[in-house]
Amino acid sequence: MDQKEMMERLKRDPAALQAVMGSRDGQMLLGLLSGSDGGRTLQQAVRQAAAGDASAISGMLQGIMSTPQGAALVQRIGESLQK
């Protein structure tokens, strides 16, 4: 499951989103996305995504996925969504 498929699944399936965010991996991802600004950038990206522009949050995920640890984390989350 690629990043776009994962985001679409989470957008249309609130139960899947809740399960992911309640998981250990989801919490780790949230911590990485929140960054050092107390989550302000993440909140703005979420608002933009809710308005139909997912480019900011997609960019944030790309940054996380550029590291081996981040890529493994996102892969585990994607695998959990396929179950």
Image (cartoon, rainbow, N blue to C red):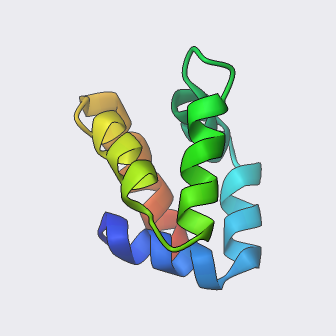
Q: Relative to the observer, which residue lies in front, 47 or 81?
A: 47
Q: Relative to the observer, which residue lies in front, 54 or 5?
A: 54
**Residue at 59% over, 39% down:** 42
- Can the viewer see residue 25? no
Picture coordinates of residue 32, whole percent (x, y): 52, 29
- Can the viewer see residue 69? yes
**Residue at 49% over, 56% down:** 77
- Vertical placement of residue 10 versus 32, above or below: below
**Residue at 34% over, 30% down:** 69
User: Would you say 41 lies left or right of 40 here?
Assistant: left
The part of the image, by quadrant, that contains residue 67 is: top left
Which quadrant of the figure contains the N terminus?
bottom left
Single out the residue that lies furthest toward the bottom: 12
Picture coordinates of residue 73, whole percent (x, y): 43, 42
**Residue at 44% over, 65% down:** 79
Picture coordinates of residue 78, whole percent (x, y): 43, 64
The part of the image, by quadrant, that contains residue 60 is: top left
Picture coordinates of residue 19, whole percent (x, y): 73, 63
Q: Relative to the observer, which residue lies in front, 65 or 37?
A: 37
Which quadrant of the figure contains the C terminus?
bottom right
